[in-house]
Amino acid sequence: MKNIFETAREDDRLSTSVRMADAGGVTEFLQKRGPYTVFIPTDEAYTRIPEEKLEAIVSDRERLAGMVMYHVVQGKLTTHELAQMEAIKTLQGDHLDIAASPEGMQLNDAVIIQPDVECTNGMYHVIDRVLIPRAVEARVERSF
């Protein structure tokens, strides 16, 4: 078994998220510590974000790190454990809303499409949308 970052790197659907973690400077953090639960968007999820908005986030390392850390929570949480919660605080500082939906478990607008991938330093769940924290969203909107 490998850590969250190494395991995600081996999944071809997650290459954009892996690059975002690298570019945001949080790779080492995700490799060494834990336990964490990470919600990892698929490559396809990034295509749903308008290109200019994504560029505004990626071009600012602090914004990018904030966005990546908005996908990380403390502790190793299965979808069963998440289902008992209404919200959870991320390592970025904002909260994610948790709800059940016909499609599956939702975090804000994202749906978990592959749950409970176990790793040495925690667990990750693959999601179908990128989670953008309110603070990053507001700063990006002001930059247009």
Image: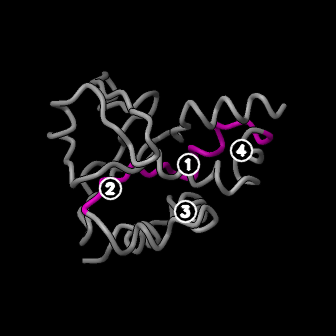
Mark pair 4, 1: CA separation: 13 Å
On the image, numbered disc 4 is attached to which residue?
54
User: Type of residue at label 4?
Assistant: Leu
Would you say 108 lies left or right of 98 here?
right
User: Type of residue at label 1?
Assistant: Gly
Q: Residue at x 66, y 43 (%)?
A: 47
Q: Which mark is residue 66?
A: 1
Residue 82 inside the magenta-drawn segment = no
Where is residue 114 drawn, in percent x and y?
33, 49
Q: Residues within 10 Å of mark 3 (few under 14, many from 20)?
A: many
Where is residue 76 drawn, in percent x and y?
21, 55
Question: Closer to the camera, 84 or 128?
Answer: 84
User: Type of residue at label 2?
Assistant: Tyr
Task: Give the number of the mark in front: 1 or 2.
Answer: 1
Q: Residue at x 67, y 37 (%)?
A: 49
On the image, numbered disc 2 is attached to which residue?
124
Using the rendered view, name the quadrant where residue 30 is placed.
Answer: bottom left
Mark pair 1, 3: CA separation: 10 Å
User: Type of residue at label 3?
Assistant: Ala
Question: Closer to the camera, 117 or 59?
Answer: 59
Q: Residue at x 52, y 52 (%)?
A: 68
Q: Residues within 10 Å of mark 2 (few under 14, many from 20)?
A: many
Q: Residues within 10 Å of mark 1 (few under 14, many from 20)?
A: many
**In this picture, which residue range is highlighted in magenta?**
35-52
Q: Which mark is residue 21?
A: 3
For label 2, the SS is strand
Q: Earlier in the sequence, mark 4 or mark 3?
A: 3
Q: Earlier in the sequence, mark 1 or mark 2?
A: 1
Task: Give the number of the mark in front: 2 or 3.
Answer: 3
Q: Vertical placement of 142 versus 1: above or below?
A: above
